[in-house]
Image (cartoon, grey):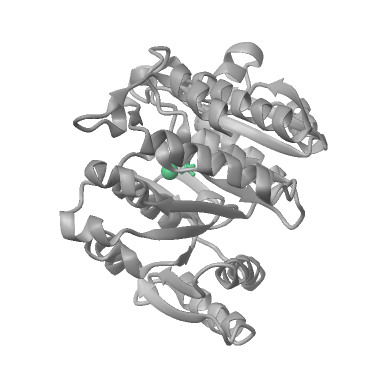
């Protein structure tokens, strides 16, 4: 296969971790006879520095023309970086939201899985960690509070800020279908998370999820309030298979889910539209505090590249090879600092990439 991948390394640790994912992809290419062509694009802070804009229309067009996008991370330190003195729509995050919207990437898949080898890095009680967990958070990505109207204005001498949370029936249905479809390939359980005891958008969410569920008699489903879901994630994460939720709840719960896997550096993600096109990125941020030190964990980005092979290119065998290689280095005791535990061998970003690439 000859695949065209737009690569956005981005800011902070982005360039370091994406370089390792490309190394692993190239190892897959060599072994299985594929060519991955990369076109490097700018987004986020580095694009502000180069073009005065976190995401230019030209970059959007190039990303659209590719088969898939591999992304590192964007943004800097929000209290010290000059990027955060700019108006909100000119900051690094605006680029990320724009690319999600422009490419129609409404389905964000964030798998959170506890590897046996990382049980010691899991912050939960031993008896909970010992039960393990393997869930997939299906986060709606182009609606809700992130894209609703917002403004800050003075009303009767009082500063007032408004954000709006809107969901249409259509937006809910298409993400619910994605969740039930993927549940059919997993353990056939969907937990739909909402705040239906307070929010109208959640009550509509529940109604539509119930309608969609009728088409999937083999999938068991339940509704869970988001505050309870936050609690259940640390109390009994093994109960979850597919967790379906709206944009903001998914943002928050996926960080929580990543932490219990041992480190946010382990969590991959795929953002998909209605076609085979996808944008693949680690769920963690740009970690400006450790950028450039060669210590960031590249595994989330490498696993995101595996998701790209699986979802965009239908290369299941190759995706399995990457996932197996990751497991293998963990079994052999190699760890980056974030997942380090006693008796293991501590390695940096580059070495971790080399080890995984050598095992695909
Ligand atoms: C994520 C990030 C983004 C989000 C930020 C950087 C805008 O936290 O992908 O989870 O909130 O979606
Ligand atoms: Mg987030």
Q: Ligand 2 lies in which image quarter? A: top left
State the image quarter where residue 29 is shown.
Answer: top right
Above or below residue 79? Residue 307 is: below
How far across and how far down the image is residue 93, in percent? 52, 33
Q: Nearer the viewer, residue 201 or 189?
A: 189
Image quarter (top left, top right, bottom left or bottom right) of the C terminus: top right
The quarter of the picture where residue 15 lies is top right
Residue for point 67% across, 70% down: 170
* Residue 354 pos. (x, y %): 51, 21
Is residue 337 or residue 177 the one in the foreground? 337
Looking at the image, residue 328 sits to the left or right of residue 57; the answer is left
Residue 352, position in %: x, y?
A: 45, 24
Front residue (pair 14, 357): 357
* Point 65% across, 21% down: residue: 42
Asked whether, in this view, residue 228 is left or right of residue 201, the answer is left
175 horizontally vs 17: left or right: right
**Can residue 261 be seen?**
no
Whether 236 is drawn above or below 2: the answer is below
Q: Quadrant of the N terminus?
A: top right
Left or right of 28, for residue 81? left
Residue occupying the point 24% across, 58% down: 130
Q: Residue at x 62, y 66 (%)?
A: 178
Residue 180 can be seen, yes or no: yes
Q: Disc count in the image?
A: 0
Give percent across and percent down for residue 215.
64, 84
């Amino acid at each position: 296969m000859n695949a065209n991948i737009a690569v956005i390394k981005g800011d902070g640790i982005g360039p370091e971790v994406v370089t390792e994912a490309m190394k692993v992809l190239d190892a897959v290419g060599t072994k299985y006879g594929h060519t991955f062509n990369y076109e490097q694009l700018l987004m986020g802070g580095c694009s502000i520095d180069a073009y005065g804009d976190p995401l230019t229309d030209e970059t959007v067009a190039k990303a659209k023309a590719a088969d898939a996008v591999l992304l590192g991370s964007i943004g800097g330190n929000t209290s010290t970086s000059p990027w955060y003195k700019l108006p909100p729509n000119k900051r690094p995050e605006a680029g990320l939201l724009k690319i999600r919207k422009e490419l129609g990437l409404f389905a964000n898949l964030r798998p959170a899985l506890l590897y046996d080898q990382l049980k010691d890095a899991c912050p939960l009680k031993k008896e909970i960690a010992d039960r393990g967990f393997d869930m997939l958070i299906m986060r709606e990505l182009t609606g809700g509070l992130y894209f609703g109207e917002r403004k800050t204005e003075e009303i009767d001498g009082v500063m007032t800020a408004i954000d709006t949370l809107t969901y249409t029936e259509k937006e809910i249905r298409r993400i619910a279908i994605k969740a039930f479809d993927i549940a059919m390939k997993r353990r056939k359980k969907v937990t739909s998370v909402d705040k239906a005891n307070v929010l109208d958008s959640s009550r509509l969410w529940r109604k539509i999820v119930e309608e969609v569920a009728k088409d999937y008699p083999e999938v068991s489903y339940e509704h869970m309030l988001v505050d309870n879901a936050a609690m259940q994630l640390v109390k009994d994460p093994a109960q979850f298979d597919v967790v379906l939720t709206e944009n903001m709840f998914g943002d928050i719960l996926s960080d929580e889910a990543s932490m219990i896997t041992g480190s946010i550096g382990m969590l991959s993600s795929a953002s998909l539209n209605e076609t085979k096109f996808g944008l693949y990125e680690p769920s963690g941020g740009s970690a400006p505090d450790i950028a450039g030190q060669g210590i960031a964990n590249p595994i989330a980005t490498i696993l995101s590249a595996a998701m790209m092979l699986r979802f965009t290119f239908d290369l299941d065998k190759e995706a399995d090879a990457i996932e197996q290689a990751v497991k293998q280095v963990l079994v052999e005791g190699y760890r980056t600092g974030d997942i380090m535990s006693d008796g293991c061998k501590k390695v940096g970003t580059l070495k971790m990439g080399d080890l995984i690439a050598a095992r695909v």
